[in-house]
Amino acid sequence: MLGRKQLLIGGEWRDASDGRVMPVVNPATEEIIAEVAAATPADVDAAVAAARKAFTGPWSQLSARERGRLVWNLGEKLRENIDEISRLETLHNGKPITESRHIEIPAAADCLQYFAGWADKIHGDTLPVKGQALVYTLREPIGVVAAIVPWNFPLLLAVWKVAPALAMGNTVILKPASQTPLTALALGQLAIDAGFPPGVLNIITGSGGTVGQAIVEHPGIDKIAFTGDTSTGKGIMRTAAETLKHVTLELGGKSPNIVFPDADLDAAVRGATIGIFYGKGEVCAAGSRLLVDKSIKDEFLSKLADRTKKMVAGDPLNPKTRLGAVSSKAQLERVLSYVATARKEGASLLAGGDRTDIGTGKGYFMQPTVFADVTPAMTIAREEIFGPVLAAIDFADVDEAIARANDSIYGLAAGIWTRDVKKAHYVASKLQAGTVWVNTYNLYDTAAPFGGYKQSGFGREMSRYALDYYTQVKTVWVDLSN
Ligand code: NAP
């Protein structure tokens, strides 16, 4: 048991105002591993007051370079504690330790240090207006930013928001998902250790329905940066409209991964499996719709099924494990219900399809699953499953591949597998997706923007594009006539 964790408000750790707590479960063992405070709307009020006080007080008095140095220091603290934080990430989420330790927590540290570098490099312009006037712009922070994040990449998705928000001079209230609050709380302690003034980063744990809702309604919060389900995002946008908050939404996906017959098929098989089974398929950009040219379908799917059958779930803390535990009982049940629906609607099961066990009799493990003969109208071709389930759909030619790829309410990401350079660029230009990968899948870098088209949301995270969503522009006119 990792003990009882408190809220971080105004630089101090404290219990929820009514003393209530909620359990955190390790999905690989089904054991309660910690208790965290279940915050109340009164705690949200306190966090907003602390964030506002810091925003107008000590935080605003630091130079941009000093601010950047603190954000850099936070990245350093994360690197110094990388083993412990990676372990926590795996314990509360069930993801393989190799993903936490070698990909996601290092990426979070990179993200902090990338945005630290921007702190003193973002500035306004002087403008050539008509008449005799000096006109210039200032890039100013928005104010108090609330970051609300899901459970699939608990720390990384938090840092995608916290890093640019702090670097641009905002103060932050971070609400992690109830299932996975531990690494956000650890980040709070690292911010104290890195020397941030009290109230610059506040961490509030508690349920989305109460504390999340209180955050979105709060008139003292200026911006909501949200990652999560599309339906939650729509509700947040409606509620935030009441106080006209700035909103950025990173939402769901049903991303197509398109294999043309001229592709390196072995590489495409590897790419298809990484595209859907990395992170147990609990990845917003997962390549969950595999579009395969009819002429190679049988050969390709047979190779894919063989590779999938070799993947077995294992103890997430074992460095050799590549497929961890589904992150909760509810999520496992949801994934299994999609498998049942796919069978009922006539899809052919090529691999997996069931819950599995790693020899402990405990944990929410799922076999990696592939369905063939999926039609675009089937439920598993349309809805986000958020689990290790791949739906293979065929196509006859390039135009049909593009039409089928774009036949979704979502537009987060897409993959293209071909050796034909012209075709790759043509198809990339036609896909309605915020990110397109050619002959690869699931690559990210803090210098490259990420975000959605259509109902996958709006706004961009990472890269210099993200800076626009954490600043506002002030225009200053100075009369120079006579
Ligand atoms: P979710 O249910 O929408 O929850 C996300 C966060 O919102 C959690 O912190 C949740 O708190 C909170 N929340 C729930 N209801 C709320 C409300 N009414 N007001 C304010 N906050 C509220 O999503 P999820 O099931 O955790 O995450 C999976 C989804 O995230 C998938 O759809 C996935 O595609 C999407 N996702 C998108 C991206 C991207 O970058 N586009 C990245 C990763 C994931 P509780 O945990 O307490 O419920």
Image (spheres, rainbow, N blue to C red):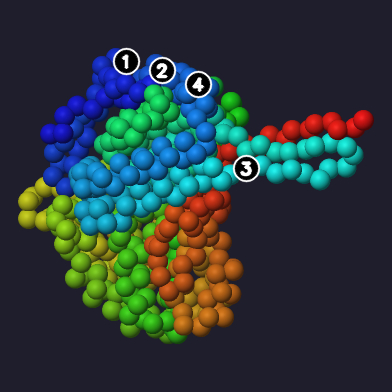
Judged left or right of residue 452, residue 291 is left
- Give the structural element (helix, strand or loop) at label 3: loop
Residue wearing tag 3 = 123
Nearer the viewer's eye, disc 4 or disc 1?
4
Instruction: State if disc 3 and disc 1 touch (CB < 8 Å).
Output: no
Crowding near the residue tagged with mark 2, few <14, some 14–19, many ≥20 C-alpha atoms within 10 Å: some
Q: Mark 3 CB in 8 Å range of ligand 1?
A: no
SS of the residue under disc 1: loop
Q: What residue type is labelled 2?
A: Ala
Cα–Cα span, label 2 and label 4: 16 Å
Marked residue nearer the N-terminal end (1 or 3):
1
The answer to whether residue 444 is visible is yes
First of labels 1, 2 by sequence position: 1
In the image, taking residue 119 as reference, residue 4 lies left or right, namely: left
Which residue was labeled with disc 2? 46
Give the answer, above or below, for where 178 lies relative to 46.
below
Residue annotated with mark 4: 57
Of label 3 and label 4, which has the lower sequence position?
A: 4
- Asked whether the residues under the numbered discs 1 and 2 touch, taking CB atoms below 8 Å apart as contact, a structural biologist would say yes
Single out the mark in the foreground, 1 or 2: 2
Q: Badges 4 and 1: C-beta atoms under 8 Å apart?
A: no
Closer to us: mark 2 or mark 4? 4
Dot 3, crowdedness within 10 Å: few (<14), some or many (≥20)? few
Q: Can residue 226 be seen in this view?
A: no
Q: Which residue is drawn at 77% across and 44% down?
A: 127
Q: Mark 1 points at which residue?
A: 17
